[in-house]
Image (spheres, rainbow, N blue to C red):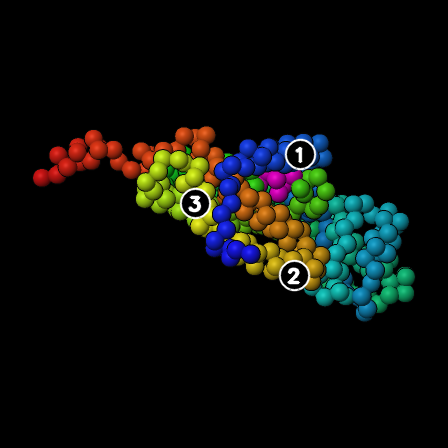
């Protein structure tokens, strides 16, 4: 078996298959978002949040069924830290007595339950959070495109921007397709995915630019393959160790960060794919050439003439 550093994979030779796979994922994600929409959490929709403490770890399904049978609508029940700490979300108008009513109802089943807190998130606050979150996401993508354009070249910026949009749409599409709760922690995960994917893309771009400048051949697919293979061990090591940590969070972290871990797992997987086949491979149809990165002889002569 060859060492990973000596492996050579023809990434660019398989780029059309990767483009098809990416297009399928994008279409499924967009259809899911349009057909099902996002299952927005209380951070965006408004509602009542109640935290209670049990004497012994309860069955979350039993708590949910009890509340729904008592007339509460859109009930979400999660553990909060310890297994005896339970967070209950109700998408309904706030009632000052709702916390006491819920605790009394839960005590009727014979459990020892204490009220920790009862809070209300207004719909207006939720709307403001949603609007500001969307604006923050757009600003982040704009700043990324500007940075890459200045750091490399505008064709690189187009590839990086399309890759980041690709990653965000697929992560959001997964949450729409499976109707997972979309709250501020998931939005934070998406912003983290943007940063992670961009970091991976910058590493690939830097190696591609260096390879184009130093290579003696003009076969761009081959140059791209050599550059991507040179960064492959670094990419797999970074992604692999990050995924191991996220799997631990998903299994052991509890319900509160479960969706956060899912968003990052999907985003890092898709981001690793897009840094090769979207941001990297798209430079070929964008007609990136050596002249885009190396000044022509005429430009160099003009610069020399301007020197005193």
Along the line of sight, the residue nearer the viewer: 148 or 140: 148
Measure the alpha-carbon separation of dots 2 and 3: 34 Å
Mark nearest the camera among 3 and 1 is 3
Q: Residues within 10 Å of mark 3 (few under 14, many from 20)?
A: some
Residues rendered magenta in the picture: 168-173
Residue 271 place in picture, x, y as percent: 55, 45
Measure the alpha-carbon separation of dots 3 and 1: 32 Å
Residue at label 2? Answer: 248
Q: Residue at x 46, y 30 (%)?
A: 285
Q: Residue at x 37, y 44 (%)?
A: 211
Residue at label 3? Answer: 226
Task: Confirm whether residue 84 shows in the render.
Answer: yes
Residue at label 1? Answer: 28
Q: Residue 178: which disc?
A: none
**Does 188 sit above or below residue 221?**
below
Q: Residue at x 41, y 36 (%)?
A: 220
Label 1 SS: helix
Label 3 SS: helix
**Does 217 sit above or below residue 48?**
above
Task: Confirm whether residue 127 shows in the render.
Answer: no
Magenta stretch holds residue 169: yes
Q: Residues within 10 Å of mark 1 (few under 14, many from 20)?
A: some
Q: Main secondary structure of the magenta part?
A: helix
The extreme left residue here reads 308
Residue 163 place in picture, x, y as percent: 51, 39
């Amino acid at each position: 078996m060859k060492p990973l550093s000596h492996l050579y994979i023809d990434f660019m030779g398989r780029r059309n298959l990767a483009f098809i796979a990416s297009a399928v994922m994008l279409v499924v994600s967009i259809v899911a978002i349009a057909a099902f929409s996002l299952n927005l959490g209380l951070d965006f929709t408004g509602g009542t949040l109640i935290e209670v403490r049990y004497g012994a770890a309860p069955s979350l399904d039993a708590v949910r069924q009890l509340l729904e049978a008592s007339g509460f609508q859109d009930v979400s029940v999660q553990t909060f830290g310890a297994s005896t700490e339970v967070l209950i979300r109700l998408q309904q108008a706030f009632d000052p007595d709702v916390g006491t009513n819920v605790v009394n109802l839960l005590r009727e089943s014979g459990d020892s339950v204490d009220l920790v807190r009862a809070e209300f998130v207004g719909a207006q606050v939720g709307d403001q959070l949603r609007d500001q979150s969307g604006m923050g996401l757009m600003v982040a993508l704009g700043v990324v495109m500007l940075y890459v354009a200045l750091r490399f070249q505008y064709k690189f910026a187009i590839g990086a921007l399309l890759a980041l949009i690709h990653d965000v749409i697929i992560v959001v599409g997964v949450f729409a397709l499976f109707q997972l709760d979309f709250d501020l922690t998931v939005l934070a995960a998406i912003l983290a995915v943007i940063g992670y994917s961009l970091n991976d893309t910058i590493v690939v771009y830097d190696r591609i630019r260096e390879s184009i400048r130093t290579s003696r051949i003009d076969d761009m697919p081959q140059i791209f393959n050599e550059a991507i293979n040179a960064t492959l061990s670094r990419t797999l090591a970074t992604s692999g160790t990050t995924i191991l940590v996220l799997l631990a969070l998903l299994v052991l972290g509890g319900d509160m960060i479960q969706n956060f871990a899912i968003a990052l797992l999907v985003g890092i997987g898709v981001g690793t794919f897009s840094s090769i086949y979207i941001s990297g491979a798209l430079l070929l149809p964008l007609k990136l050439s050596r002249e885009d990165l190396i000044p022509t002889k005429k430009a160099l002569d003009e610069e020399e003439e301007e020197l005193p």
